[in-house]
Amino acid sequence: MDQRPVSLTEQENLRLRASNLSFSAVPHQSKLFLDYIRDPLSLKSYYPNAVLSHSNISAFIPEVLAKYKTERIALCDALVEINSQIGSSEKTFENIKLLREADTVAVVTGQQAGLFTGPLYTIYKALSVIKMAEELNARGSKAVPVFWVATEDHDFDEVSHTYFTGNTGELVKADYHPTRYVKSTPVGNIKIDNLITETIGEALNDLPRSEFSGALRTSIEKEWSEGELFGKAFSKNIADVLGRFGLITIDPMHPGVKALSSPIYIDAIAKADEIVASIRKKSAALVSEGFHAQVLVDEDYFPLFRIDDEGRRVALRKTSDGVYTSKEEKREFSLSELAAIAKDDPQRFSAGVMLRPVVQDYLLPTVCYFGGAAEIAYFAQNSDAYNILDRPVTPILHRRSFTVVEAKHRRTLEKFGLALSDMFDGFVKTLENVGKKQLSSDTIKIFEEIEQTLDLELNRLDQNLSQIDPTLNDNLEKRRRKIAYHIAALKKKTYLASMRKDEIVERQIRAAFDSLLPNGELQERVLNVHSYLNKYGPYFIDMIYKEIDLNYKEHRVIDL
């Protein structure tokens, strides 16, 4: 494949190899996440409806349907409007029609509205729910896949950039910030200005040309156009990439969805103190058992944000007088006043991270949710909030997880005897290890002989000094460590010099890192899907979808 894209006529002949990598071998995974992946049933106190396998999910359907209170017709009318505006496929509208039926459940995931769809794991989340809904339908249960676009989130800096792999395999950052932007504005309300043209041009011009490049540019320019809202542009992009699978998109800021959210907002306001106390208690229990609390919840926490008169999403805090206020506004609200606003003007409220899953699963007949490690941690803290608001606790499953290894990078790994896990030590250490393998045996032998000789001679000196003055031994030990340090440092520099002597080799390893562990993180957390759509077209999505097996719980390494 190298720099040449796979053509449409070749795609059917492309064969894949895949292997699994345990998450315990991946750096920076939390103990809570690893324990949940290994044995979710052992954490029932935090995840009351945890399941050992996705095949057990259908057992929750009767309870979900029995406790579902939202008016389906009104919800589906809103979904038709939302999905019509973003150009969803006919199959999506067929699924919305199916959702109108009283015995249909939803398989749900969600993500912030990221630039050009954000990192790859956003796509993997969506494909996971599509696969789960397909399997439920195959087993005789009516289910539809739903993607919750987190348009209410207000951390624009987190979603305003994404990364591609450029012509020579280098990491290319695409960054967009509108000229006029009010901090804390929900990303769904940010209007795209003319600077987006420059961002698109800089990003796509760095991609290798292929038979798919022209159509990709046309689609992105149409979806991410001046005057469009950021959240809607994201939804259009998702619909374009995944629409043929029938994925339903829901925007929580849509007026119809907000109106349907009013009852759960009112209930959450009335029970705010109880919800906060339960979350704090659960958080403390997590920490006491050696886990971590994903979100710090103080005593003055309030589970809902308020949208102020300037359109900002502001946090409300409980004062010592028992009223609620925000640092941005010079206003105070009682619980009864907040409840009245939620009844008459629900657009003024937005669920915080601890309440958002409950609101989502109140609006939708959610049978399960697919999330990442951080979302799994959120669910450990807020499970009691479901009970307080009389909602069944939603089982959470981990989304599928992939690293895609293209042929040229696979050849690099094989050439130097590397696996993906070997690269977790970082670029410099990997370069050093490869340099050691490349270095002549004579040089390595000299280092080994010097180390052995020094060790023997220093031992002789140590014995001699102990007879003269035992206190000299401590001084010698310090100097021994310094000598060993300097020899090790020289050896390391020699390995690196051996590698850097060959610029092509260093460049190959750097390119492999930029593709497989960009910015030192898993590929799926950094790279954008359009890097691969540009090379392989829609086949890339089909390939990933075929690789999704809900039975495995490990990270999947796919060789193209």
Image (spheres, rainbow, N blue to C red):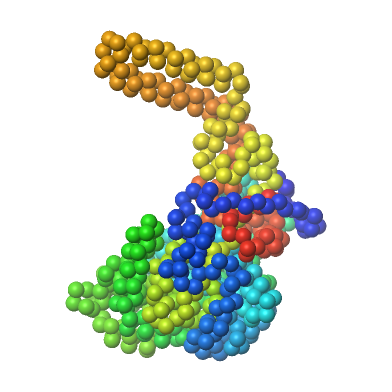
Q: Does residue 248 lie above or below 115 as drawn? A: below
- Is 28 on the left-hand or right-hand side of 412? left
Residue 93 in view here: no
Tell me the residue at 36%/68% (across/down): 282
Residue 72: image quadrant is bottom right
Q: Is residue 431 above or below residue 305?
A: above
Q: Position of residue 184 (x, y in %)?
A: 37, 67
Residue 175, image x, y percentages: 49, 56
Residue found at x 59% / y 24%? 439
Give whichever of 376, 503 is nearer the camera.
Answer: 376
Residue at screen point 46% across, 72% down: 48
Residue 143 location (% of width, % of height): 62, 78
Left or right relative to 175: residue 501: right
Residue occupying the point 52% across, 19% down = 447
Q: Nearer the viewer, residue 334 or 223?
A: 334
Residue 318 lies, in percent from the top left, at: 25, 74
- Report if residue 155 is visible in the image: yes
**Which residue is more in the foreground, 28 or 307?**
28
Identify the image quadrant of residue 325.
Answer: bottom left
Q: Is residue 31 left or right of residue 534?
A: left
| Figure label count | 0
Q: Is residue 537 above or below residue 488?
A: below
